[in-house]
Amino acid sequence: MLILKRKKNDSILIGNDIRITVLDCDNGSVSLAINAPKHISILREELTEAERSNLDALLSDTDSLRSIEKGLNSYMKK
């Protein structure tokens, strides 16, 4: 992990085509501008965590539905 201190309007370059610029700093919050190629996905971390949680919930629901389906199929065969 690289830790940097930047001031307002300072930038960080990642490779040759990603630039992160500090737009504003106040009240413990930082506003950033990220300039990157369109093919690079930029997401807030909490969104990826929420997406992961939703997928986990969906998979467990799918497993529950399959279990119910197996039970119904067994019941219907009787």
Image (tube, rainbow, N blue to C red):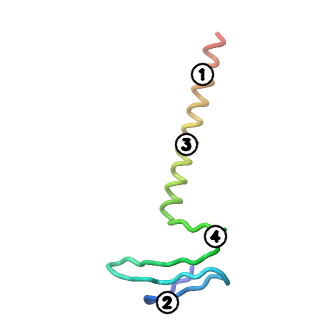
- Report how far apart the C-alphas of labels 3 and 4 lie in the structure: 29 Å
Residue with the mark numbered 2 = 10
Residue displayed at 51% across by 58% down: 49
Quarter of the image with the C terminus in it: top right
Q: Secondary structure at mark 2?
A: loop
* Numbered label attached to residue 58: 3
* N-terminal-most mark, 1 or 2: 2
Discs 3, 1 touching: Cβ within 8 Å: no
* N-terminal-most mark, 4 or 2: 2
Residue with the mark numbered 1 = 71
Q: Amino acid at mark 3?
A: Leu
Quarter of the image with the N terminus in it: bottom right
User: Seen from this angle, which residue lies furthest left?
Assistant: 27
Residue with the mark numbered 4 = 38
Discs 2, 3 touching: Cβ within 8 Å: no
Q: Secondary structure at mark 3?
A: helix
User: Seen from this angle, which residue lies furthest top?
Assistant: 78
- Relative horizontal placement of residue 23, taking residue 52 as reference (left or right): left
* N-terminal-most mark, 4 or 1: 4
Instruction: Look at discs 4 and 2 and give the one toward the viewer.
Output: 4
Q: Amino acid at mark 2?
A: Asp
x, y percent for residue 15: 66, 82
Q: Secondary structure at mark 4?
A: loop
Residue displayed at 64% across by 74% down: 37
Instruction: Look at discs 3 and 1 and give the one toward the viewer.
Output: 3
Discs 3, 4 touching: Cβ within 8 Å: no
| Crowding near the residue tagged with mark 1, few <14, some 14–19, many ≥20 C-alpha atoms within 10 Å | few
Residue displayed at 57% across by 68% down: 42
Q: Amino acid at mark 4?
A: Lys
* N-terminal-most mark, 3 or 4: 4
- Report how far apart the C-alphas of labels 4 and 2 lie in the structure: 22 Å
Q: Amino acid at mark 1?
A: Gly
